[in-house]
Image (cartoon, rainbow, N blue to C red):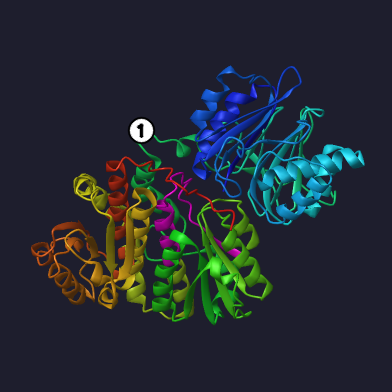
Amino acid sequence: MCGIVGYIGTREAFPILIKGLRRLEYRGYDSAGVALINDDGGLNVCKAKGKVDNLVEHCKEKNISGTVGIAHTRWATHGEPSAVNAHPHYSESKNLAIIHNGIIENYAELKKKLQEKGVKFVSDTDTEVLVQLVEYIKEHKQLDLLTAVQVALYQVVGAYAIAILDKREPGQIIAARKQSPLVVGIGDDEFFLGSDASPIVEYTDKVVYLEDGNIAVIRRGEELKVVSILGEEQELTVNKLDIELGQIEKGGYPHFMLKEIFEQPECLTNCMRGRLNVEADHVTLSALIDYRRQLLNAKRIVIVACGTSWHAGLIGKQIIETLCRIPVEVEYASEFRYRNPVVTKDDVVIAISQSGETADTLAAVQLAKEKGAFIYGICNAIGSSIPRATDTGTYIHVGPEIGVASTKAFTGQVTVLTMFALALAEAKGTVDRDEYLEIVKGLSKVPDQIREVLKTNEKVADLARTWTYAHNSLYLGRGFSYPVAMEGALKLKEISYIHAEGYPAAEMKHGPIALIDSDMPVVVIATHNAMYEKVLSNIQEIKARQGRVVALVTKGDNTIAKIADEVIELPDVLECLEPLVATIPLQLLAYHVAVCKGKNVDQPRNLAKSVTVE
């Protein structure tokens, strides 16, 4: 959840660390801090509550010299946001400093034992327990830093990505990971460290993704060394980054979220490239070729995901069942992992995660693997934990998503699920050839149709100005569109802090209709599909109770335009592809409402981009 960055080389570390923190701030922004081994040999920790700008201001009168350092931007788990609880944390002697992403589950037990031995603590965090444990082991057993870290981590229960400095060994950083991402960048006589590649891409395209249970020994003037907790040297796999610096910058947009909304036509083109042929009459997924038997023989598909990815899974369920005639269940990964689910070797489990690091989804994958299921991953971040833990899968290839509220990742996930359903249905022979061609051709047109929808941006912005008074909002849809309604409501909640709920439109009569009055705006996805007349009836029920209706309609629909207060026109698309175009104005609406309310769009309160803790 938090962001980690590190540097060791010949340049001044502080500017590199601060730039890295700014690029990782989407992962957490409760507090930030930096630890530097200064030119005079001291180990100096500076930290501040709030965002990276606060840290920079705090450091103006501090010693920020040095070519070795680590830095951190925090999303609070243990201990409230404060300068004291901010990372890095010193050991009691101030010889060591540590930064940490994750949760030490047995921190209370370890802390009690250390306190009984006379160790004094200054913060409420689980992270300070770890650095104090490392120091205690190092001093009492007379060990070097690497060995002390290995012994300490062997006692730890939980998830972590850590980086640690020792001022007595100034030419090194020790870093380790378990169930939390960590990347080492390899430059010319220098190394970089990051929770993801965004702080690294400006300096090198060569990276090593640390595996679970591994420790990186990063020493100035030496080759990168990676060992296990037990000290076994690990073989290095150096990967080439496939992202560019421009992808992680705003490019003239006021916010990353708006940039990422407008990137979707190009992103979905990239997602389909090499998979949907230029004639738009065939979909090919390498996973279907390489693992044909496992996928064709599936008796059931279980989709595990969280948040926005769960909504994409609901859409995937409908199109897979429609085309492939295989039963599909969609599970919250956080619930799946804690009940005793019935999973067999005949099941295919699809894990969906933008970051590929979502802790609950990763744990669900591990549980399903233990039960013998075949695991298929749908992720965006190449080299992340979930793709490495699955049997096969498909990257969505929409580029880095920096805005905390997911936009292009959602449409990328839905696009991949649609291609998966098409490829599997064709292989199984469960789809009529004409229907298959119609959907494939329709999918190929979606990027241009999204460009058309994006032209409604100004209209949506005008509409948003009247939305700021609302305390609650309702989103309704039917069929393929009801998960879109849920996703639209989530977006509004996430960044404008207006309470909103999404429902299947027919369920309105089973409770939510009691909430409707003139102060309750209602968004209805009312495109011209098989359930159009029923949704029209739902709109009339809302209007009869003085509800204010904003309707998403198919271009040229004049019937609902006469009833609704506002309409936003969408291009005419196949019903199964409607989610890809209908979600765009809902993303824009959430964005513009949040801007009107003066909210921090890219960094909403209490949220972080990658949920790597429970």
- Quadrant position of residue 60: top right
> Residue 185: percent from the left, percent from the top?
65, 37
Q: Is residue 606 visible?
A: yes
Residue topped by disc 1: 252
Quadrant (top left/top right/bottom left/bottom right) for the C terminus: bottom right
In the shown orientation, is residue 38 left or right of residue 141?
Answer: left
Q: Is residue 403 magenta?
A: yes
As drawn, 456 above or below 186: below
Q: Is residue 276 visible?
A: no
- Quadrant position of residue 493: bottom left
Badge 1 amino acid = Gly
Boundaries of the magenta span: 392-419
- Quadrant position of residue 435: bottom left
Near-viewer residue (46 or 502): 46
Near-viewer residue (115 or 564): 115
> Residue 63: percent from the left, percent from the top?
64, 19
> Residue 254: percent from the left, percent from the top?
34, 36
Numbered label tally: 1
Residue at 48%, 52% in the rendered image: 397
> Residue 585: percent from the left, percent from the top?
27, 54
Q: Which SS class for mark 1? A: loop
In the shown orientation, is residue 218 left or right of residue 5?
Answer: right
In the shown orientation, is residue 300 left or right of residue 565?
Answer: right
Residue at 55%, 24% in the rendered image: 58
